[in-house]
Amino acid sequence: MLRCRNVHPTPETRYLIDMVQVVEAFRASDDFDRELVGIYHSHPRTQAYPSPTDRAEAQWPLAAYVLASLRSDEPELFAYRIRDGAVLEIPIVEP
């Protein structure tokens, strides 16, 4: 897992992955036979569902987009595939 910086000018309400870190992660994946399988972020005040911005900015259609909502005492966690703006919920399996 690689935790990337949020470089958006208003990080309280938006996120923008630091592309320098993403490029470095992809370069490192060549050395360790890794691939991008998921991207996660939180929605502190709203539901754990891809916002219109999330859908518009999704760049990796094969990755799982995992969203955590912190709007209640018990966090909500869901995963989705986002392709061409369409959202498909995918299961999260516990061991």
Image (cartoon, rainbow, N blue to C red):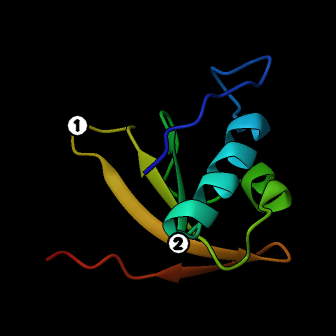
Position of residue 49 measured from the top left corner of the image (x, y, whole percent)? 56, 60
Task: Give the image location of residue 13, x and y in percent.
Answer: 67, 27
- The vertical placement of 27 against 16, above or below, is below
Q: Quadrant of residue 60?
A: bottom right
Callout 2 amino acid: Asp
Left or right: 25 in relation to 45:
right
Residue at image point 50% right, 64% down: 32
Residue behind mark 1:
73
Residue 87 occupies quadrant:
bottom right
Q: Residue at x 68, y 57 (%)?
A: 26
Q: Residues within 10 Å of mark 2 (few under 14, many from 20)?
A: few
Q: 32 or 85, which is in the foreground?
A: 32
Q: Residues within 10 Å of mark 1 (few under 14, many from 20)?
A: few
- Which label sits on residue 46? none
Relative height, residue 5 to residue 77 (above, below): above
8 sits left or right of 78 in the view: right
Measuring 86% from the left and 77% from the top, which residue is drawn there?
Answer: 84
Looking at marks 2 and 1 on the same chain, the residue that comes earlier in the sequence is marked by: 2
Horizontal and vertical percent position of residue 45:
49, 34
Q: Percent from the top left, x then y, of residue 40?
A: 51, 52
**2 or 1: mark nearer the eye:** 2
Q: Secondary structure at mark 2?
A: loop
Q: Nearer the viewer, residue 11 or 24?
A: 24
Q: Is residue 95 above or below residue 45?
A: below
| Secondary structure beneath label 1 | loop
**Marks 2 & 1, CB-CB < 8 Å contact:** no
For this orientation, the residue located farthest to the front is: 31
Q: CA distance from mark 2 to mark 1?
A: 38 Å
The residue positioned 22% from the left and 37% from the top of the image is: 73
Q: Point out the image quarter for the C terminus.
A: bottom left
Give the residue at mark 2: 33
